[in-house]
Amino acid sequence: MLNVATGVDIPVVEIADRVLDLLGRPASLKVHVDERLGQVDRHIGSTEKIAELTGWRARTAFDAGLERTVAWYRDNEAWWSALAMPVDVSSS
């Protein structure tokens, strides 16, 4: 198994803030939940193994990649909306 990652440590809550900002949505949409059993403090993908085996390294900065990802989802809603599970945000 190989991680295709940036190797950059960005907290999940900060990623949520960045996504909401790109969508022009308020931070109040974030929902904090209790930690899961066995929750770890950091989620950072190591890039060493993929670089060693293939020479691949991320060339796109996280923010630029996130912007491109959000744009793709905006531009391809017909494709992904049929796959998406409904989300209840009425209690937010």
Image: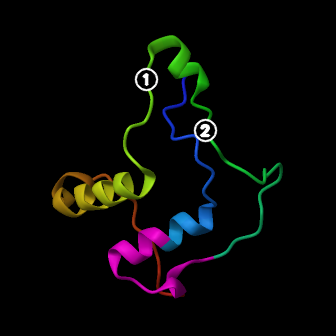
Q: Is residue 9 above or below residue 31?
A: above
Label 1 secondary element = loop
Q: Quadrant of residue 91?
A: bottom right
Which residue extends farthest right?
38
- Residue 25 falls inside the magenta stretch: yes
Q: Residues within 10 Å of mark 1 (few under 14, many from 20)?
A: few
Q: Is residue 57 above or below residue 88?
A: above
- Residue 73, image x, y percentages: 26, 58
Tell me which residue sits at (59%, 20%) in the image: 49
Mark number displayed over residue 45: 2
In the image, 44: left or right of 63? right
Label 2 secondary element = loop
Region rendered in magenta: 18-31
In the image, 64: left or right of 7? left
- Residue 38, image x, y percentages: 83, 48
In the image, 44: left or right of 74? right
* Amino acid bearing label 1: Trp
Q: Residues within 10 Å of mark 2 (few under 14, many from 20)?
A: some
Mark number displayed over residue 56: 1
